[in-house]
Image: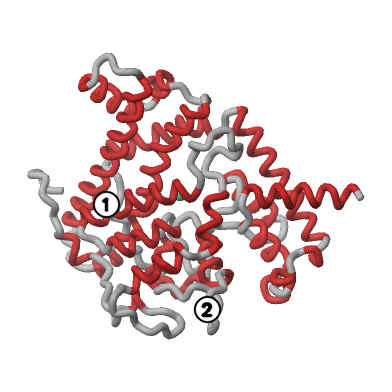
Amino acid sequence: MDGNGTKNFNLHRCAVSDDTNDTLTARAYDAPLRPSRTAFQRDRERIVTARAFRRLAGKTQVFTSRASDHFRSRLTHTIEVVQIARGVAQALGLNEDLSEVLALAHDIGHPPFGHAGERALDTCLKLHGLRFDHNIHALRIVEHFELRYAAHRGLNLTLGVREGIIKHSRDYTVAQYPELACYLLDRMPPLEAQIIDLADEIAYLTADLDDGVESGLLEIGHIRAHVGLLDDCFTQIEQIHPGVEEKYLFNEALQLMQNTLTDDLVATTLANTRAIGATSLSEIRAHTARLAVFSAVAEAQRQQEKHYLYETLYTCPELSLEHDKAEEVITRLFNFWINKPDELPSGYVEQIETEGLARVVADYIAGMTDSFILLQYAQVKRAVRR
Ligand code: MG
């Protein structure tokens, strides 16, 4: 936004093009053009109708126990990221459809049980000389596991979407990941991909305080004493609505906090891009650092809150118990299928020769929802006892 509040579309020239002749709209396999929809709008449909996308409804965001129907799942978290990313893309004049697809896909590679599940799977794979990375797993899902087309495996997404999936939250090097060389690893991702990680941060920094209070594990006064940004927002809301019940002030303070971080991201990205004089996508790509970042003030506030959430919520005794259980379930099932590969579904057994057993077991586990993996765990425990 400009100082007068009007939208500034200066970054439009730095946006990814929808042009069907552009390399970023190209697909690995021929797909007839659809005159009524752009390439990225078609990719949105391909993601939304993917089985892995639907399974996000059954995957943990932060709370593995279903003590409340109001906690975010990976799916509802994803919807929140979409609306933030789309708003930022629109305010900056970027390609909104591409940002929306990348936000929809940003957590599609996450295993059950949230980050505890990801850590447990990574630990299991390390013993076999491999690693688990949810971005690379997301790429395996869209390129390999989704089976919806007669002529090929995978969703046949555009290069722009596949590049964004792999690069939205971190940078990979060709030396470490030669299999990713086709994704222009020596270049920065487009701004449409750069904003996704920050939209994700804005979404969960807001939602985790909300769910934390809903769970009873966080207390509003304690948050205010330790999270400066939320306290500033709460004070502003309190001045507008004196005497109103704390929970309503808190809800509005969360909304204000989300808006403050979003506006900061828009303004800082615009200022950074203007500062280097970039007027094209190739200049965004050639720059040595990401341009979509928070200002120094907002970044310090973000780090303070993240530290608070880590110390007070993510590692609290109640969630640590859930994490221990997640680790036990994943480790035990992983070892079970490593020792009894014939017990895997036939589609996975067929993959062992090309992918290796440990990767195939991890692929199978990573795709599971929380409820499905607990069912598998119960069945395996019964089978072992027999
Ligand atoms: Mg996320």
Q: Which residue is drawn at 33% across and 60% down?
A: 99
Q: Residue at x 18, y 66 (%)?
A: 13
**As drawn, is 148 to the left or to the right of 196?**
right
Quick check: is the Cβ at mark 1 less than 8 Å away from ligand 1?
no
> Spatial distance from mark 2 to mark 1, Cα to Cα?
33 Å
Mark number displayed over residue 63: none
Relative to 360, residue 273 above or below = above
**What kind of residue is marked 1?**
Val
Q: Pointer 2: what residue?
A: 149
Foreground pick, 351 / 48: 48
Relative to 160, residue 5 above or below = above
- Mark 2 / mark 1, whichever is N-terminal: 1
Please, what secondary structure does the residue beneath circle 2 have?
Answer: loop
Looking at the picture, how far across and down is residue 345, in whole percent? 73, 66
**As drawn, is 330 to the left or to the right of 266?**
right
Tell me which corner region of the image, top left, top right, bottom left or bottom right, holds residue 246.
top left
Q: How crowded is mark 1: few (under 14 residues within 10 Å), some or many (20 or more)?
A: many
User: For the view shown, which residue lies furthest in the left direction?
Assistant: 4
**What kind of residue is marked 2?**
Tyr
- Contact between marks 2 and 1 (CB within 8 A): the answer is no
Q: Residue at x 62, y 33 (%)?
A: 320
Q: Which residue is drawn at 33% across and 64% down?
A: 98
User: For the view shown, which residue lies furthest in the right direction?
Assistant: 386
Foreground mark, 2 or 1, reads 2
Instruction: Please state the total of marks drawn on the protein image.
Output: 2
Looking at the picture, how far across and down is residue 29, in whole percent? 46, 83
Mark number displayed over residue 88: 1
Tell me which corner region of the image, top left, top right, bottom left or bottom right, holds residue 164.
bottom left
**As drawn, is 59 to the left or to the right of 223?**
right
Q: How crowded is mark 2: few (under 14 residues within 10 Å), some or many (20 or more)?
A: few
